């Protein structure tokens, strides 16, 4: 019996140790993946902001805390600017392309060349964005953790926290994570880093605007598994103490009746397996063994209640109730606190998600409005002035007529673009009239649209709701024209005192809503959700239907 008790304690401790080890490894890799993803998001945002600014022809920032501008000007062929050898692309580029010049920088600083076409020639800007500060932020990485970038030549692009005085591009990183990332793979695991030290690593390739970087977030195995070593020491100490008590207790208890102890052992094994079965029909004596069995019954009942409650709140049922066994019921109190925190977390998560979606949509609409206004108020008058000057010029009549026709086409296309970005009728007269104007632009030979607008004079619709309704119709109409192969379409927009309702139906070929991977339906659903509305879509061989209902605030 002593051997059995010892083996049982050892097995349970070993199982707990292995489970804890596996859980700790998974948690470390999950933490590293989260840190890596955060770094990727911040780096992408930094580069996207820089590219957008450069592409728009705006002045690049010269704040050393954001970006250092080393050169800005036109280049006509392959050239050398300072320490940097510039090789132009063989084929004409359509958008901004980034050149990795870090390996040419004398100090190994992250240096990028940005190319775009301007007036048929290449415009080059050489910048040093402050990406190193993003990578040096070590929150969640402990004492030995770091995040760093590696180029396709296996040379480091960012500074090493272990070799801060060494030029990054002089450090070769030929680890398994880098080799996998060069194949386009992302993942995590236990590998050897560039120092030859075993580390937990999360890696992923970053490819954007022509760059081919690899980001790695790592932490030394020794530091990550330190709690495991401490647990092993504690388990050995506990096992030693348990063994001493087993030897003493077994000697005394061996003189008592064997059967109650065997039964007790069986009950304990069942409880150790998570089986909390009570002996409802068994009568216990008044001795110590009987008291133990009665206590086990009470414990089983309490654990069953606790497990049931934990399972319900774990599945999201926050209406579950739990009655404390006593004022000292710490487990029950902890579970109730966990329930409150989970419920609060769920509510906060929903609220933050909704606020983030609303901010993104409103920001996009503001940018649309700004671009529309810039095109209408800035580019429009310039084109009109150019047309007037052309008409008053002394050019040949045929050439003047061709140029005038070209400018008129540009003005027409610019007005269409400005109207698509933010129709003036939408801000002046609301969604109902904006939809009517949108429908009027569609060729009836291509698609016969029946539009019904039930307007209420006493209803005031906010600008955000008007924009949401208009964008849903705009996206739906675009999808029908591009994909549905429909001949007829019905749109109904109704204003009620407390809500607005939108109904869209077409006779196209339909689709499977569960198999759509584009952004159109998702964007429509998000726009309605941020306004606390209801969005429903159904589709079949006879066509598709969209129903939207948004409450008025």
Image (cartoon, grey):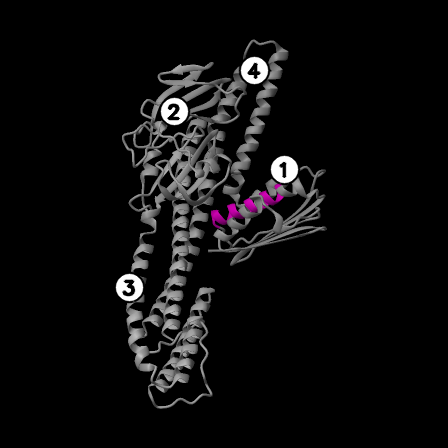
Q: Residues within 10 Å of mark 2 (few under 14, many from 20)?
A: many
Find residue 465 and report its horizontal and vertical position in percent: 50, 49
Q: Distance between the residues labelled 1 and 3?
A: 81 Å
Question: Which of label 4 and label 2 is nearer to you?
Answer: 2
User: Can residue 258 be found in the magenta stretch?
Assistant: no
Q: The residue tagged with tag 2: helix, strand or loop?
A: helix
Q: Residues within 10 Å of mark 3 (few under 14, many from 20)?
A: few
Find residue 279 and report its horizontal and vertical position in percent: 45, 84
Q: Earlier in the sequence, mark 2 or mark 3?
A: 2
Q: Give the range drawn in magenta.
A: 462-478
Question: Which of label 3 and label 4 is nearer to you?
Answer: 3
Name the residue that disc number 3 marks: 237
Residue 140 showing in the rendered view: no
- Secondary structure mainly formed by the magenta segment: helix
- Residue 103 is labelled as 2
Question: In terms of depth relative to the viewer, which is nearer, 157 or 551?
Answer: 157
Name the residue that disc number 4 marks: 391
Q: The residue tagged with tag 3: helix, strand or loop?
A: helix
Find residue 220 and report its horizontal and vertical position in percent: 34, 44
Q: Quadrant of residue 349?
A: bottom left
- Residue 441 is labelled as 1
Q: Distance between the residues labelled 4 and 2?
A: 55 Å
Question: Which of label 1 and label 2 is nearer to you?
Answer: 2
Q: The residue tagged with tag 4: helix, strand or loop?
A: helix
């Amino acid at each position: 019996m002593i051997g059995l008790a010892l083996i049982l304690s050892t097995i349970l401790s070993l199982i707990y140790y292995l489970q804890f080890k596996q859980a700790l490894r998974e948690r470390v890799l999950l933490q590293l993946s989260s840190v890596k993803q955060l770094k990727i998001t911040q780096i992408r945002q930094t580069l996207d902001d820089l590219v957008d600014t450069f592409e728009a022809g705006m002045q690049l920032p010269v704040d050393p805390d954001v970006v250092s501008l080393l050169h800005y000007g036109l280049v006509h062929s392959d050239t050398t600017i300072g320490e940097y050898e510039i090789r132009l692309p063989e084929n004409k580029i359509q958008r901004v392309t980034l050149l990795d010049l870090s390996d040419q920088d004398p100090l190994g600083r992250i240096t990028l060349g940005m190319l775009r076409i301007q007036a048929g020639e290449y415009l080059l800007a050489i910048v040093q964005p402050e990406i190193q500060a993003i990578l040096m932020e070590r929150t969640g990485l402990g004492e030995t953790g770091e995040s760093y970038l590696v180029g396709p030549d296996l040379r480091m692009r960012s500074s090493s926290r272990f070799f801060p005085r060494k030029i990054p591009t002089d450090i070769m990183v030929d680890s398994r994570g880098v080799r996998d990332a060069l194949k386009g793979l992302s993942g995590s695991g236990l590998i050897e880093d560039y120092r030859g030290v075993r580390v937990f690593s999360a890696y992923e390739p970053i490819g954007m605007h022509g760059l081919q970087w690899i980001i790695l977030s790592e932490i030394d195995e020794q530091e990550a598994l330190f709690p495991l070593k401490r647990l092993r020491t504690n388990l050995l100490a506990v096992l030693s103490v348990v063994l001493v008590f087993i030897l003493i207790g077994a000697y005394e208890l061996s003189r008592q009746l064997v059967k109650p102890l065997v039964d007790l052992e069986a009950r304990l094994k069942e409880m150790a397996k998570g089986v909390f079965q009570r002996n409802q029909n068994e009568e216990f004596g008044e001795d110590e063994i009987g008291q133990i069995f009665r206590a086990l019954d009470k414990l089983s009942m309490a654990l069953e209640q606790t497990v049931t409650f934990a399972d319900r709140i774990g599945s999201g049922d926050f209406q579950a109730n739990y009655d404390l066994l006593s004022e000292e019921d710490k487990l029950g109190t902890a579970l109730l606190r966990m329930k409150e925190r989970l419920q609060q977390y769920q509510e906060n998560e929903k609220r933050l998600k909704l606020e983030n979606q609303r901010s993104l949509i409103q920001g996009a609409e503001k940018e649309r409005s700004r671009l529309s206004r810039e095109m209408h108020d800035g580019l429009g008058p310039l084109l009109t002035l150019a047309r007037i000057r052309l008409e008053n010029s002394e050019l040949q009549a045929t050439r003047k007529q061709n140029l005038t026709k070209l400018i008129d086409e540009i003005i027409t296309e610019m007005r269409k673009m400005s109207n698509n970005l933010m129709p003036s009728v939408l801000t002046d007269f609301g969604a109902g009239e904006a939809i009517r104007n949108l429908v009027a632009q569609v060729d009836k030979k291509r698609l016969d649209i029946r539009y019904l607008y039930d307007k209420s004079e006493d209803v005031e619709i906010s600008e955000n709701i008007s924009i949401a309704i208009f964008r849903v119709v705009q996206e739906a109409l675009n999808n029908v024209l591009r994909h549905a192969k429909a001949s007829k379409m019905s749109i109904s927009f109704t204003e009620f005192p407390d809500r607005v309702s939108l109904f869209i139906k077409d006779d196209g070929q339909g689709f499977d809503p569960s198999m759509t991977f584009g952004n159109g339906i998702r964007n429509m659903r998000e726009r309605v959700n941020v306004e606390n509305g209801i969005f429903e879509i159904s589709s079949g061989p006879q066509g598709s239907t969209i129903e939207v209902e948004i409450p008025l605030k």
